[in-house]
Amino acid sequence: MSITASFWIFFIPLSIVISFVSAEYTWPSAQHDALEQFLYEGTHVTGDNVAGLARFCLPRFLPGGDQPSSVAAEWVRLAYHDMATHNATDGTGGLDGSIFYELDRPENVGAGNVNTVGDFKDHSSKLVSRSDIIAMGAVWAVAACGGPPIPFRYGRKDALKAGRSGVPEPQQNLASHIESFRLQGFTQKEMIGLVACGHTLGGVRGVDFQDIVPDPSISSIATFDTTSGLDSAFDHLIVTQYLNSSTQNPLIRVPSGNSTFASDLRIFSSDQNATMKGLNSETSFSQTCTTLLAKMIDTVPSNVHLSDVVTLLPVKVSNAQITAIDSQLVFMTDLRVAFPAGISPTAASKVQMFWCDSRGVFKNCNRVTNVASLPFLDEPSTSPLTDSLNIQLVLYRFKVQISASRSVSKFWFEIDGAIHNNGGNGYPIGQDEIIFVPSLGSVDPKFLQPDPANPSEFLPRNYNLVFGVSVTPLITNEFILIVIYCR
């Protein structure tokens, strides 16, 4: 007898579901699923909305009353400083997370780099590298400030030590700048464009560069253009103000008066302003920055191979599991659907989940196909990239009772009459002999506690993990529960 839920819920018609996705994708794909979710939802598996720190090009407010810079500007700067270790001659270095070991260098001075390392350091995993998060941070940052969507690829490998020195410093001469960018893999023309694209955000903090921005209170930031730190700050005003001589860019008009530090002036004028004149429109600036910033975050060691560009999955399955809740075996899964922003899911439409038994007389949908039509409607978070694409995400959570004697072999969905079945194969359940039962587990203590003997360290957490192992033969709903204690 099939499990049927004869309920209806209101949904958007399928005709306006976002419909772009790589034809190569097949579920499950653990790394791709994790990176796609992080990129477009912006939330780590712990629930931390990392990408949200940069939303709306917000400033970072810190204790002490210092004038804040935008989080986005700090994230773009860190990505460049990490990439700058690349040596195009021998293929070493690049965006590989080595910046975590390089913050003590003069070339990496600044609270911004320290802040960003703090933002990202606890959110890597076996599927998501620190360097991939740094690259995502640059993508989120540009989108959060009204800039173009930068293509993102994953697969970066984290370095285990510092890389070479490679970040140009303001007091260096033009020949040094050109050589630094050449080693990083950029031509002189690309150097000019990349500096302009990076410096449309942020500025120079007096506390870190008092030779450039002297300030008795050590609390000021001299911004590169007059829209830095504001919503839609990613624009070509840095170019326009330079060309019409109204700029107050501290690396052009150095507040201290020491022209040795006028590095942007040297770089921008190095080809008689030809490149800057070509960037002096919204379209050309956006197109150039898309290309150059993508090249920047894709600059990796030669032995690292990145994925194809990660596009948003219009219909995505996640958290599929068989588990036990209140002594009842259940099958749960989430279905995330992308819609254009600004449209409320109120149009009458039907969404159903179907599944086949994995054993018994109805195995493989023999005579009976199970169906459920009562998901719980939820709204996942979105990243600045998703917001910039004018896309909203809606989450439909399915939870149905099943029996161990029948279980689930595969499932699929129908949205307003259209089938979503993983390329015709259905979404498979790999095994059901061992199930995880998080509702019976625990973490003690819930929050990290300082070690009394060493206050700078924290006591380890104790994890009680509960698993169910099916009884053989599988003719009942019985599972043997096993508790594993981890510390």
Image: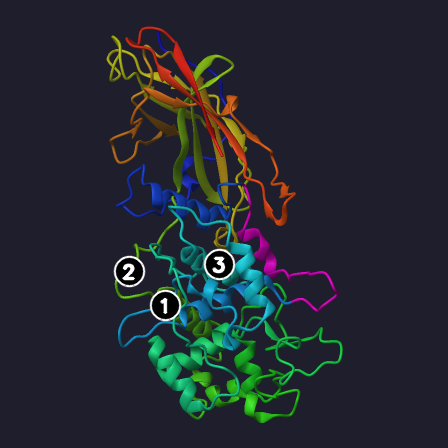
* Left or right of residue 390: residue 156: left
Asked if labels 1 and 3 touch by Cβ distance under 8 angstroms, the answer is no
Q: Is residue 94 left or right of residue 392?
A: left
Counting residues from the N terminus, which is met first, the one under dot 3 or under dot 1? 1
Q: Is residue 270 visible?
A: no
State the extent of the magenta-drawn residues as a range.
47-68
Residue 218 in the image: above or below residue 116 = below
Q: Residue at x 48, y 58 (%)?
A: 137
Instruction: Quadrant for residue 409, please give it.
Output: top left
Query: Residue most toward the front?
Result: 453
State the image quarter where residue 451 is shown. Answer: top right
Callout 3: helix, strand or loop?
helix
Q: Amino acid at mark 1?
A: Gly
Q: Earlier in the sequence, mark 1 or mark 2?
A: 1
On screen, 2 above or below 157?
Answer: above
Residue corresponding to mark 3: 137
Q: Earlier in the sequence, mark 2 or mark 3?
A: 3
C-alpha span from label 3 to label 1 = 16 Å
Q: Which mark is residue 304?
A: 2
Between 426 and 127, the residue placed more toward the observer is 127
Q: Which residue is mark 1?
A: 94
